[in-house]
Structures are given as C-alpha cells and as structure tokens.
C-alpha cells in the first residue's frame, strides 16, 4: 500500500510540474500576443490557447495542492476540537472531497468522450478541437480523488506519515 501511495504522491508532484509549465507557457503566449498586436498584426489563437492552458493547470495542479494542504481548510474548528473530533472532521471533509472529485471525473469523462466522438470544435477563428480542453477535468479530478485516498489513509494511520489534519 505504501508503494501505491508513493506513486500517487509522485504523480501529484509530476502533475504540479506540468501545471507549472502550462502556466509559464500561458504567460509566454500572452506576452507574445501583446507584442504581436503592438507590432500591428492580428492574432487568432493566442488568447484561447492561453485560457485553455490556465484551466488545465488548475485541474492538474489540484492533486498537489491537496497533498501540500493548500486547499481550503477548517482551521478554526481544528483549534477548538479534540484530537478525536479533528480526526472525524478530517474523515468527513476528505470523504466529501473524494466523492465530489469522483463525480466531477465521471461527468468530465462523459463530456470529453462526447466532444471527442462528435469532433466538436471551438467557435473561435482557430477552431481547435474541444476534447483536449475538456480532458484536463477528468484527469485532474481523478488524480485528486486518488490523492484524497492517500490523505484518508494518513488519517487512519495507514499512510507514510500522519497528515496535518490528523494530528
């Protein structure tokens, strides 16, 4: 089980690296767009592509954010609850998060497959295929669900180290 947890956490780290690269690429594309427009030329793909990269970065960065306790927490309750109460709160919150991520992964997969099979394209001038844009949601949410499983195991003492919320 520890080996699986290690791989999931490494995958979360790899997704964070991809998300960071996507954000950096998005910044470069926007800088290019501004410089290109300033030179008097028109563009067709830059804005749409940079938005797609930023959205993908949010979904792909989600597992790492969970791993590093960067998501919204209930710190006020953590300070007033007993250890047992904190543990119950962590299990409840992480279970809800796991279920939401699984639902979003399932719904996102359905949307992605639908636009893949239909060959649907965006409405912009560039008319890019929509399925790569939609694919970031099910991938990111499924990986976040896996990270929630790792975090739940930490609360129960099965993981590599107790999480902040389990202390």
Image: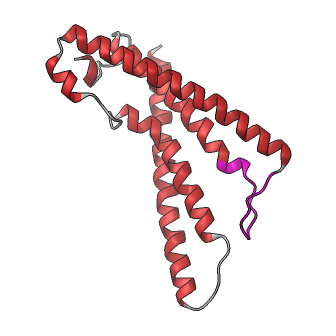
Q: How many marks?
A: 0
Magenta residue span: 120-133
Q: Is residue 34 left or right of residue 120?
A: left
Of the 4 image quadrants, the one containing the C terminus is top left
Q: Position of residue 71 (x, y in %)?
A: 36, 36
Point 27% across, 17% down: residue: 166
Q: Which colour scheme is used?
A: secondary structure
Q: In this view, does 94 lie to the left or right of 138?
A: left
Q: Which sits in the foreground, 11 or 142?
A: 142
Q: Which sits in the foreground, 17 or 42?
A: 42
In the image, is residue 104 above or below residue 48? above
What secondary structure predominates along the stretch shown in magenta? Answer: loop
In the image, is residue 32 above or below residue 21? below
Q: Is residue 167 visible to us here?
A: yes
Q: Where is residue 155 in the image (x, y as percent from the top left)?
A: 33, 14
Q: Is residue 106 left or right of residue 117?
A: left
Q: Where is residue 16 in the image (x, y as percent from the top left)?
A: 46, 44
Point 59% across, 26% down: residue: 103
**Residue at the extreme left of the image, as rendered:** 80
Q: Residue 107 colored magenta?
A: no
Q: Where is residue 37 in the image (x, y as percent from the top left)?
A: 56, 85
Q: Is residue 7 visible to us here?
A: no
**Residue at the extreme bottom of the image, as rendered:** 40
Q: Is residue 124 left or right of residue 99?
A: right
Point 35% across, 18% down: residue: 160
Point 61% across, 63% down: residue: 49
Q: Residue 127 colored magenta?
A: yes
């Amino acid at each position: 089980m520890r080996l699986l947890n290690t791989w999931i956490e490494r995958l979360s780290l790899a997704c964070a690296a991809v998300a960071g690269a996507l954000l950096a690429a998005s910044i470069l594309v926007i800088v290019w767009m501004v410089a290109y427009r300033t030179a008097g030329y028109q563009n067709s793909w830059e804005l749409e592509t940079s938005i797609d990269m930023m959205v993908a970065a949010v979904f792909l960065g989600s597992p790492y954010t969970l791993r590093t306790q960067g998501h919204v927490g209930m710190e006020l309750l953590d300070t007033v609850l007993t250890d047992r109460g904190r543990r119950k709160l962590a299990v409840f919150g992480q279970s809800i998060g796991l279920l939401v991520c699984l639902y979003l992964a399932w719904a996102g997969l359905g949307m992605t497959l639908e636009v893949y099979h239909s060959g649907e394209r965006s409405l912009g001038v560039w008319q890019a295929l929509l399925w790569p844009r939609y694919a970031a949601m099910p991938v990111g949410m499924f990986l976040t669900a896996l990270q929630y499983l790792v975090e739940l195991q930490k609360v129960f003492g099965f993981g590599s180290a107790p999480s902040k919320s389990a202390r």
